[in-house]
Image (spheres, rainbow, N blue to C red):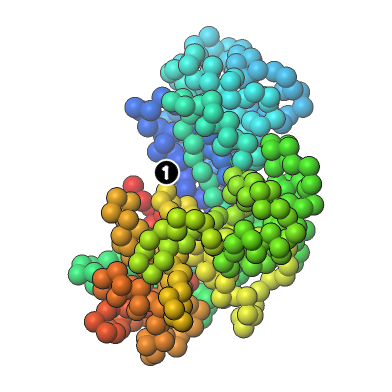
Amino acid sequence: MRFDNPWWVDGMIQDDYRGMQPRLYLDSFYRLLCEPDIRRSIILMGPRRVGKTVMLFHTIQRLFNDGVNPQKVVYLSIDTPIYNNISLEELFAYAREILQDNNANGYYVIFDEIQYLKDWEIHLKTLTDSYRQSRFIASGSAAAALKVKSIESGAGRFSDFMLPPLTFEEYIHLLRYDNLIRPKTITWKGREQSVFDCIDIDVLNQHFIDYINYGGYPEITLSQAMRKNPGQFIRSDIVDKVLLRDLPSLYGIQDIQELNRLFVHIAYRSGSQFSYESLSKESNIKKETLRKYLTYLESAFLIKIVHKIDVCAKKMQRVSAFKIYLTNPALRCALFSPLKEGDEALGGMVETAIFAQWFQREYDLFYANWKVGKKEGEVDIVRLDDIKLKPQWLVEIKWSDRYLSKPGDLNSLEDFMSKNQLSEAIVTSKSVSGAVEYKGKELLFMPSALYCYLVGHRTISKP
């Protein structure tokens, strides 16, 4: 314990952690931790290798900066072999014994890799109830299992905090390319809106493609050596551990290779429309098993299913088709090969990258897809009003500049807007910006990289 808590002596976290750029999610996580009116334990969860442990150490340093006594902060990694079968309360007691402190109030106690303790949720609930003047934080890599147990046992006692893969804004921030981006103001929907511009869109687009290939995980973002073989790092350390260990142990999956085959199939076609019938035929998996596998993959934060509405923005009574996106585009690179400018699959992964920023928000998005007679159409992103179930806004994602000068080619978007009495929509491009009025409707064009950056920024900075 003394080795893992060097600040008990020198008042600082280890040098290597202090030298790392903090994730931009640190501010909102720290606010939750210090909220005086919420006496709950915090469950920090998220996919493997997104930087949960590093963020915990940055949280510890911030506590010190705000005047917390370093001897009131305890960090315990539960995967340490010597801690096997020791309860959380006993570990807390041992720490206070070392510190010669009989007062259990005012502590910040962190249990990292908590999934290694059987029935951890029962232990943590007991601590939360027994030591109400101290704060407890738990984190772990088996995100699906943490989520299930937190919901089942932590009602009213646990607050979940999801740390997702890096947003594009965080990717730019970690690599210290912030000087490429500059804020600007535009008039949109009758009022001034804060968005972003960039100094050189070609340079930003190259970073955007790198983000699509490598950008979800801090380690691979910062390591040129790992980028040379992203498959070895991401596939073995992230995908395989989730598919071959976490999910089978949690849900009792027998045919691991079948689950793996399904995920590979989805990753290759991220952003495509599927149906249970077509996916069953393509993967040779029974539909009932398929439904379970998709639920499991969503619970592990590997995929996200986006549901369909029709041209009138009505939800389907029967789920006939849906889209599946990777929650992190870099997963595709790990399984196949890095994409480069001109690759046919890049457009779909641009769409996946943009959706990945939105998945971190708390509301659902839809896509519109319809066939009326011989007329077919699709709109990529539709946000519905939660109460009225009417479209609030639309985004059409394109990795091309031609639509700014040829808005008439956006027939599906115009049809959907007319049908639902919408006067404005956003269309992404490869590199051009501008506003165009077409058939009484205003279309705002914005480069996909800048739109991706904007969505990620607003996701993190929201109140």
| Crowding near the residue tagged with mark 1, few <14, some 14–19, many ≥20 C-alpha atoms within 10 Å | some
Query: What residue is pinned by disc 1?
Result: 28
Residue 288: image location, x then y, percent = 66, 48
Outermost residue on the bottom side: it is 405
Q: Quadrant of residue 435?
A: bottom left
Q: What's the residue type where badge 1 is placed? A: Ser
Query: How many dots with numbers?
Result: 1
| Helix, strand or loop under label 1 | helix
Residue 386: image location, x then y, percent = 33, 51
Q: Quadrant of residue 339?
A: bottom right
Outermost residue on the front side: it is 373
Q: Residue at x 62, y 33 (%)?
A: 112
Q: Residue at x 59, y 19 (%)?
A: 123
Q: Nearer the viewer, residue 113 or 378?
A: 378
Residue 79 visible? The answer is yes
Q: Nearer the viewer, residue 66 or 106?
A: 106
Q: Residue at x 77, y 27 (%)?
A: 81
Q: Nearer the viewer, residue 66 or 164?
A: 164
Residue 329: image location, x then y, percent = 60, 63
